[in-house]
Amino acid sequence: MTIRSYLIIASAAAALAALAIAAPVRAGGDKIAFPESHEAGVLFTTVDRADNKQFREFYASAAALDAAKKGEPLPSGTVITMRQYAAKLDAQGNPEKDANGRFLKGNLIGYAIMEKRTGWGSEYPDNVRNGEWEYQAFKPDKTVNTAANLGACFNCHKPLDKQDYVYLYDKMKAAAK
Ligand code: HEC
């Protein structure tokens, strides 16, 4: 075999391997249906993101907040909904602030969801898997945002394994009744 044909075969094999890793993550996200009733849960905190000029709202069930308060993993069936809004900008393009110094919400630009259910995640290798969590992104019209990189969701949340892969675990704890 020439070096050139070896390289072509090797790079094709690498591309296939990358697909094999990306594909299950993409399919896993399809388990998540748009959480139509998220507003019936608790709006447990909001976050101003200066880096991408977003204002975000976070919703979860009272049962999930109760589990966080006890320091337990969140129960099967937990859905955490992030509503992403563009921050309102001033004439210079900087986020406007309210009397408390918080961003003001402009247009809804999307949703990021994480959901866990007993048995989910078992098809992933350990270096990908985040317990029983799956991730999905939706557009403002509630259809799946197929441009989202769901592998990145797993990757960035993975270091939070001591608090069930949830960044805002302490905010959930604080919001429990
Ligand atoms: C680069 C790191 C990063 C990536 C990639 C990422 N997240 Fe997060 N995520 C965060 C951080 C940090 C927070 C805390 C809230 C904030 O800053 O907006 C968060 C919070 C969340 C929350 C609220 C629960 C929690 O963990 O606090 C959900 C739901 C969520 N992300 C879903 C997703 C989804 C779905 C994706 C992929 C489409 C994703 N995230 C990708 C960093 C990330």
Image (cartoon, rainbow, N blue to C red):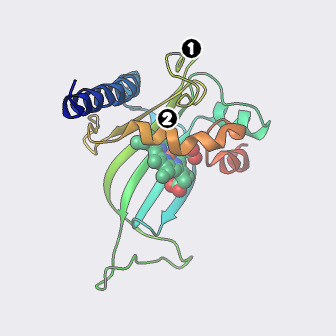
> Which of the 4 image quarters holds residue 147?
top left
- x, y percent for residue 13: 30, 25
Nearest to N terminus: mark 1 or mark 2: 2
Q: Which mark is residue 114?
A: 2
Q: Nearer the viewer, residue 103 or 50?
A: 50
How many numbered discs, if any? 2
Pointer 1 with pointer 2, Cβ within 8 A: no
Label 1 crowd bin: few (<14), some (14–19), many (20+), radius 10 Å = few
| Location of residue 156 with respect to 122 vertically, above or below | below
Q: Is residue 167 visible?
A: yes
For the N terminus, the image quarter is: top left
Q: Which mark is residue 119?
A: 1
Residues under labels 1 and 2: Cα distance?
15 Å
Tag 2 secondary structure: strand
The residue at label 2 has a CB less than 8 Å from ligand 1: yes
Question: For the residue marked with disc 1, what is the amino acid?
Answer: Gly
| Residue drawn at 41 percent across, 78 percent down | 96
| Residue drawn at 61 percent across, 21 percent down | 76
Query: Residue lying furthest bottom in this view?
Result: 92
| Location of residue 85 with respect to 168 vertically, above or below | below
Question: For the residue marked with disc 2, what is the amino acid?
Answer: Met
- x, y percent for residue 15: 29, 31
Q: Which mark is residue 111?
A: none
